[in-house]
Amino acid sequence: GAGAGAERRSGKELTKVGSSGGEMWSRTLLKSLRGARQSSQQSGERSLGTLCIVEAKDGAGGLDSASKATLACAQKHLPKPFVALVASDAKGASEAAAGEIASLAGVETVLHGVSDKEGANGLLAEPLSQVVAALVGKLEPTHVVTGSNTFGKNLLPRVAALLDSAPITDVVQVVDESTFVRPIYAGNALSTVKFVGKGPLLLSVRTTAFGSEALETAQGAGAEVASVGAEEVAAGAAAEALSEWVGEEKSESERPQLDAARVVVSGGRALKSKENFEMLEKLADQLGGALGASRAAVDAGMCSNDLQVGQTGKVVAPELYLAIGISGAIQHLAGMKDSKTIVAINKDPEAPIFKVADYGLVGDLFKIIPELAEKLPSQK
């Protein structure tokens, strides 16, 4: 409650320390929490407001859209204060993200350095879930929140199993501190869910629902930045034998990220081949947008699976979504129907995509796309 949060804030005397000071940070934080925890245990309540888990990847150029949405949800809709935990594959990216988060309003402490090994071990779900579980046991937050992206979907179920608490996933609206709205049946219905367990309350939030909310900057000095305690790092290290980071292969592109682009040009099965799919690249470049695809196009080998939009791919909500040669299966609609403007091009006038499209063009895409590309000025 507010009283517990106030007690904790008044007793906080944290200093910025390196990784060797993790144990010092743990002792200091535990001491500052003692009074709040004693009173909260007597009342059956937990001590801290929210533990916010974000991902910071090397070379990403700052916080990604999922991390920003997670922070926005914690800042605007969940109990304060909140502690942010940064998981990263590089020390530099971790420190940069921690500094950026520390400037936000409502943040009490930013923790980083979840692994004592350099590299991508900090993003592996097996050891990271142990770190998070240990932190939850120490800080006793009422809520734990992360993004509903690949990182969050990999991490949250493991944390939930360790804490024996059912997670609430894909949250699109916060009604109150224990009631949330989430899509079901591939987005065709919205379910209002109330958490009645003992906690902590674990949830993941959709980028498209909270990503447009601006983050508020703190007035005055920013939050403290500290390393994760030695006990929590040791808990993660004990689980490192469960998985090993082998490597990552990713395609480099000057186009914006799919889940953060203002314009998305997606192609489907009707393009028939990888060579035909490439003509959408020119159109995407002209519009300054990202390239997307249906699952059928991905399964047919026309493009890589990181372009997939839909229930089992990425969920996007750009200002403009061009669905080219996409029939509009329910699984695909679940990933793009929240787009501000949807334009569909398909030769079948009965295609389901036209039911959600704002503008529809019935015709042969192999004639329409070259003509459209010829008439559009380049916006790249």
Image (cartoon, rainbow, N blue to C red):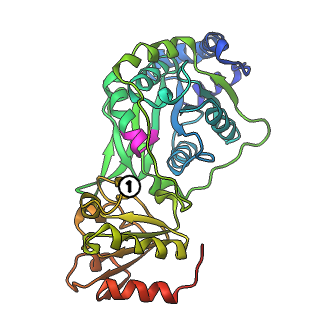
User: Which residue does the numbered mark 1 point to in the structure image?
Assistant: 314
Looking at the image, the residue that sits furthest to the right is 220
Q: Is residue 244 above or below residue 53?
A: above
Q: Is residue 313 above or below residue 204?
A: below
Looking at the image, how many numbered discs can be counted on the residues?
1
Residue at image point 29% right, 76% down: 325
Asked whether, in this view, residue 207 is left or right of residue 230, the answer is left
Asked whether, in this view, residue 329 is left or right of residue 230, the answer is left
- Image spot of residue 29 (x, y percent): 62, 16
- Image spot of residue 196 (x, y percent): 32, 34
Residue at image point 42% right, 20% down: 130
Q: Quadrant of the C terminus?
A: bottom right
Looking at the image, the residue that sits furthest to the front is 275
Decide whether residue 333 is among the magenta residues: no
For the record, the magenta segment spans 146-153
Instruction: Indicate the amino acid at tag 1.
Output: Lys
Q: Quadrant of the N terminus?
A: top right
Residue 255: quadrant of the picture = bottom right
Residue at image point 36% right, 51% down: 181
